[in-house]
Amino acid sequence: MKILVVDDEKLLVKGMKFNLENEGYEVECAYDGAAAVELARSARFDLIILDVMMPEMDGVEACMRIREFSNVPVIMLTAKSEDADKLMGFESGADDYLTKPFNILELKARVRALLRRAAGTQRSSGRQLAAGDITLNTEERAAFKAGRPVELTAKEYDLIELLMRNPRRVYSRENLMNVVWGYSYGGDYRTVDVHIRRLREKLESDPAQPVYILTKWGVGYYFKG
């Protein structure tokens, strides 16, 4: 698997490259957001690790531009711990984030988890899920709205597949974090809200009045099959 590491701290990039290559990944490096976008456009990567604060173009803008042509999984790195900065990363299309300084073992664990989900391991081959005009091809991890393909990030796909496999089952935000992300953000469950809103914008005819991805007020979210 091929990973793009992007950060203007060259020593940090060198350390991440060394550790990820020791795990068997092929690693390419860049040091600003503009270069990251060009590399992502010209080559195929299985995952991108992208710092937020960089010259030329910051990581948030770079992620948004990459999302215009690719749904490659993205892990954002940030030196800030404020919730607003984390949510801004998710708004731009990131799938996960790490706050600097971070433990390299945690980074490798996040990389493995995200690549595993993106590769669709432990999926049923050739299966389809359908409800109304929404269809998922679980073999290809592809989503369709009225027959037209819809680009979803890895986490968006994991989330909608879970909900569609379990129609009318209400999941709390904490449940969804544990099942889809595989770990807790220490109570910052607004991450789930951001992903639900993006799914509604992509899959609902009227996101303000959803008919599929519904809210059980005070409890959580569910899919009305």
Image (spheres, rainbow, N blue to C red):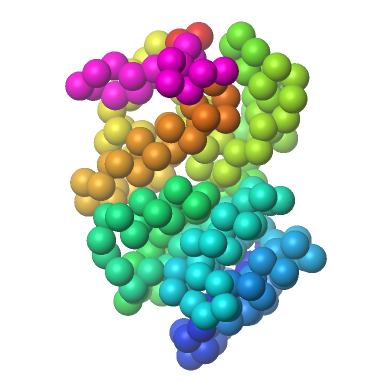
Q: Does 119 sit above or below residue 15?
A: above
In reply to whether residue 61 is colored magenta, the answer given is: no
Determine which quarter of the picture holds residue 149: top right
Residue 181 location (% of width, % of height): 41, 45
Q: Main secondary structure of the magenta part?
A: loop
Q: Which residue is at the front of the view, 211 or 155?
A: 211
Q: Is residue 142 visible?
A: yes
Residue 192 location (% of width, % of height): 36, 38
Residue 170 location (% of width, % of height): 33, 18
Return the residue found at the far right.
Answer: 42
Region in magenta: 205-222
Question: Residue at the spot x=43%, y=32% of the render?
Answer: 197
Question: Residue at the spot x=62%, y=18% of the render?
Answer: 134
Determine which quarter of the picture holds residue 151: top right
- Number of marks in picture: 0
In reply to whether residue 210 is colored magenta, the answer given is: yes
Report whether 1 appears left or right of 202: right
Q: Does 95 sit above or below residue 111?
A: above
Report whether 65 appears left or right of 187: right
Determine which quarter of the picture holds residue 107: bottom left
Q: Is residue 223 visible?
A: no
